[in-house]
Amino acid sequence: MQLFWLSFGFGLVTASVLAISAVGLSLQFGITNYINFAYGDFMALGAFFTYVLNDELLHLNIWVATLGGSVAMGAFAVMLNHFILAPFARRFKKTFYVLIVTFGLSLILLNLEYSIWGADVRFFSMPLDRAHHIGPLILTNSQLAVMAIAVVLMLGVHAMLKTTRLGKSMRAMSDNTTLAMTSGIDTNRVTTITWFLSGALAGLSGAVLGITEGNLTPAAGELFLFVIFAAVIVGGVGSIYGAMAGALLIGLATEVSAAYINPAYKLDTAFVILILALLIRPSGVFARPGRA
């Protein structure tokens, strides 16, 4: 039983990282209506921005560096959309073509990371972690911080979507971009802000993934991307709350299963859940009408 609770605590941490990344991907998809296959590389690049601020350049505190790396990745995501993705989206009406572009962008970013930082495993400069017994769970300071960040961000995203003018504009664009434009919503501004938020969340999730995993590699984001897709699809593509629920389910399932099967296959648990979800409820737990 102790092994179960230990893996359950790890599952909550993994679910927190998944929730941050899945919400960022869902925000971007809700506005643009195409999947960004370079999102995993956004995560890795944001983590390396954090690494530069934390270990290579300014030697900032890990959490301050994480904030700086997330903001830098948000700004970089806006630039990538403005100069690369948006022109293709305007020229080609079918999202399939933009999907291919994101594949190419993924390869470019991955090789850029390898050319700058190499293939060696990197480590953040962090103080020694202390473990805390919280009921049957055992969690370190950094794990508790990651969980707290995820909870605050989820509450913040909920408040933004429900109470702010920006959130209402996002919801309107997600439902019908043309109608939102004719209603006076500045769709270009909303899209830019959404890309910044999505990129910042990708950078943040990449950094906290490196913190929880204890290491950093250029390929880490691409491997984690498939787990993010599983969480997003199980929760319901385009649904923010579905992404949160899917992240919790997938995060707990992968880590708890590792207590009973070979840990090398724990990510396969996410695909088993994904297959079952597609068979039983293909639209996801919180399905959005009209979404793929």
Image (cartoon, grey):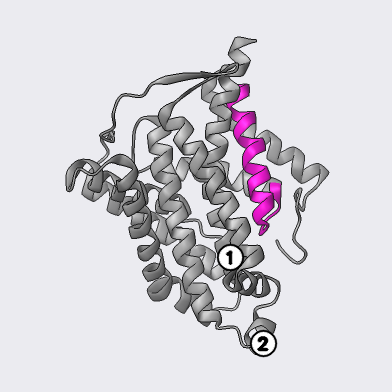
Sooner in the amino-acid sequence: mark 1 or mark 2: 1
Q: Nearer the viewer, residue 39 or 188?
A: 188
In the rendering, which numbered label is found on residue 119?
none
Percent across and percent down for residue 95 are 59, 70
Percent across and percent down for residue 26 are 59, 57
Q: Amino acid at mark 2?
A: Ser
Tell me where residue 262 sits by quadrant.
top right
Q: Is residue 198 left or right of residue 161?
A: left
**Which residue position holds label 2?**
183
Q: Residue furthest top?
A: 1
Asked whether the viewer can see residue 259, the reply is: no
Asked whether the viewer can see residue 184, the reply is: yes
Percent across and percent down for residue 254 are 60, 29
Q: Is residue 196 left or right of residue 266?
A: left
- Is 202 rendered above or below residue 219? below
Q: Nearer the viewer, residue 2 or 38?
A: 2
Instruction: Please state, as top left, top right, bottom left or bottom right, where the C terminus lies in the image.
Output: bottom right
**Which residue position holds label 1?**
34
- Residue drawn at (31%, 40%), measured in percent from left and top? 62
- Residue drawn at (55%, 63%), measured in percent from left and top? 28
- Residue drawn at (57%, 72%), measured in percent from left and top? 166
Magenta span: 235-257
Residue 249 lies in magenta, yes or no? yes
Instruction: Please state, as top left, top right, bottom left or bottom right, where the N terminus lies in the image.
Output: top right
Residue 247 lies in magenta, yes or no? yes
Dot 2: what SS?
loop
Dot 1: what SS?
loop
Tell me where residue 265 sits by quadrant.
top right
| Dominant SS in magenta | helix
